[in-house]
Amino acid sequence: MTDMPGKQLLHLVFGGELEQLDSSTFKDLSKLDIVGIYPNYATAHTAWKAKAQASVDNAHMRYFIVHLHRLLEPSQG
């Protein structure tokens, strides 16, 4: 997905340690790492990639990108 120049499409990057590798249930919600909210997918992906690579030694640590713009304006896709 590519974002149109100048259009703000908010994305949230967060992560945490999972209970099991085959689920998306976190061990401790109070320890979630809220990386930030970004104006487009490209910058969110850059932040996600940096965090994911920094935590590569912990197999249970996962980072996610949430397309906030889809939640805020579902009709916009």
Image (cartoon, grey):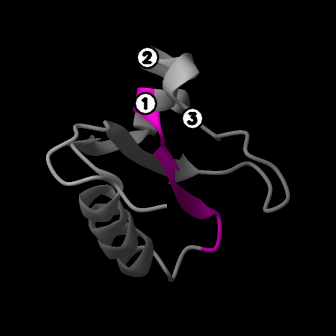
* Nearer to us: label 3 or label 1: 1
Q: Does the magenta stretch include residue 18?
A: no
What is the x, y in percent for residue 62?
A: 56, 60
Q: Name the residue under label 1.
A: 68
Q: What residue type is labelled 3?
A: Asp
Q: In this view, does 23 lie to the left or right of 47?
A: right
> Any mark on residue 72, and which?
2
Q: In this view, does 16 lie to the left or right of 37?
A: right
Q: Residue 37: tell me if it is visible.
A: yes
Residue 30 visible: no
Q: Is mark 3 on a helix, strand or loop?
A: loop
Residue 29 versus residue 60 in the image, above or below: above
Q: What element carries label 1?
A: helix
Which amino acid type is marked by label 1? Leu
Numbered range of the magenta stretch:
59-69
Counting from the top left corner in percent of width and height, residue 32 is at 44, 39
Residue named by callout 3: 28
Q: Which of 72 and 23 is in front in this view?
A: 72
Label 3, label 1: how far apart the Cα atoms are: 23 Å
Residue 33, percent across and down?
Answer: 36, 44
Question: Which part of the image, by quadrant, shows the C terminus?
Answer: top right
